[in-house]
Amino acid sequence: MREHDRRVLLLAIGVCLFLAAVDQTIITTALPSILDQIGSIGDVSLLMNSYLVASVTFGPIYGKLSDVFGRRNILILAILFFLLGSILAFLGNSPIELACARFIQGIGGGGLFVLAFTIASDLAAPRNRSKVQGLFASVFGLASISGPFVGGLILEYFDWGWIFLFKIPFSIFSLLI
């Protein structure tokens, strides 16, 4: 594989990782607005934990499936789950609907985390893996800073549902690459 192709692929994987990381920070910012419109303070754990439980549960499954069916195919599946969950979360009108959508999104998010690191280690030579790890650490830093900022901007000018639509172009970009 040419060096240029590796860099483009690493960019797409970085975008996948950014999607999974920024998701939690944007939701945290939007949670009070979401609960004002469709829920109560008792629904906080349901909305936050549905994504986390799915992500942690399905992460190892994605690792094994990618060994059997190939990393690319399973990464596409993870992106599709994340995309479907984002669309369903936008359409959700109750805490239960939103929690179910977040669970589906978490199924995809777990794959994005696991497969991003797995594919990056496959692409990078052992001596260059620390550079890739540093790049991915900066993606987490960017997500932790930009998530609350973007979430606040979206809530200022749009409805809370748009925080889920915000991630769709990034998902499609990753799918195309």
Image (tube, grey):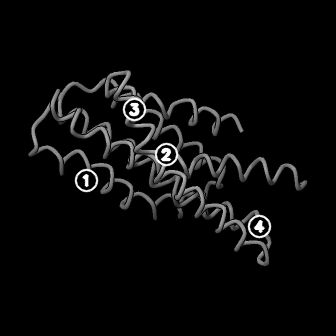
Q: Which residue is mark 4?
A: 124
Q: Which residue type carries mark 1?
A: Asn
Q: Is residue 4 left or right of residue 9?
A: right
Ranked by sequence position, the earlier of labels 4 and 1 is 1
Tell me whether the residue at label 2 lies in contact with that at label 3, contact meaning CB atoms closer than 8 angstroms: no
Question: Mark 2 or mark 3, which is nearer to you?
Answer: 2
Ranked by sequence position, the earlier of labels 2 and 1 is 1
Distance from disc 3 to disc 1, alpha carbons, whole Å, reads 18 Å
Residue 135 drawn at (x, y percent): 66, 62
Ranked by sequence position, the earlier of labels 2 and 3 is 2
Question: Mark 3 or mark 1, which is nearer to you?
Answer: 3
Name the secondary structure under disc 4: loop
Distance from disc 4 to disc 3, alpha carbons, whole Å, reads 33 Å
Distance from disc 2 to disc 1, alpha carbons, whole Å, reads 22 Å
Distance from disc 2 to disc 3, alpha carbons, whole Å, reads 13 Å
Q: Which residue type carries mark 4?
A: Ala
Q: Which residue is mark 2?
A: 146
Ranked by sequence position, the earlier of labels 4 and 3 is 4
Residue 94 drawn at (x, y percent): 18, 29
Residue 171 drawn at (x, y percent): 56, 36
Asked if 127 appears above or below 151 in the picture, the reply is: below
What residue appears at the point 23 percent right and 44 percent down from the top-left corner? 47
Q: Which residue type carries mark 3?
A: Ile
Which is more toward the observer, 1 or 67?
A: 1
Question: Mark 4 or mark 3, which is nearer to you?
Answer: 3
Question: Mark 2 or mark 1, which is nearer to you?
Answer: 2
Asked if 107 appears above or below 66 in the picture, the reply is: above
Query: The C terminus appears in which quarter of the rendering?
Result: top right
Label 4: how many Cα within 10 Å (few below 14, some 14–19, many 20+): some
Q: Which residue is mark 1?
A: 49
Distance from disc 4 to disc 1, alpha carbons, whole Å, reads 33 Å
Query: The N terminus appears in which quarter of the rendering?
Result: bottom right
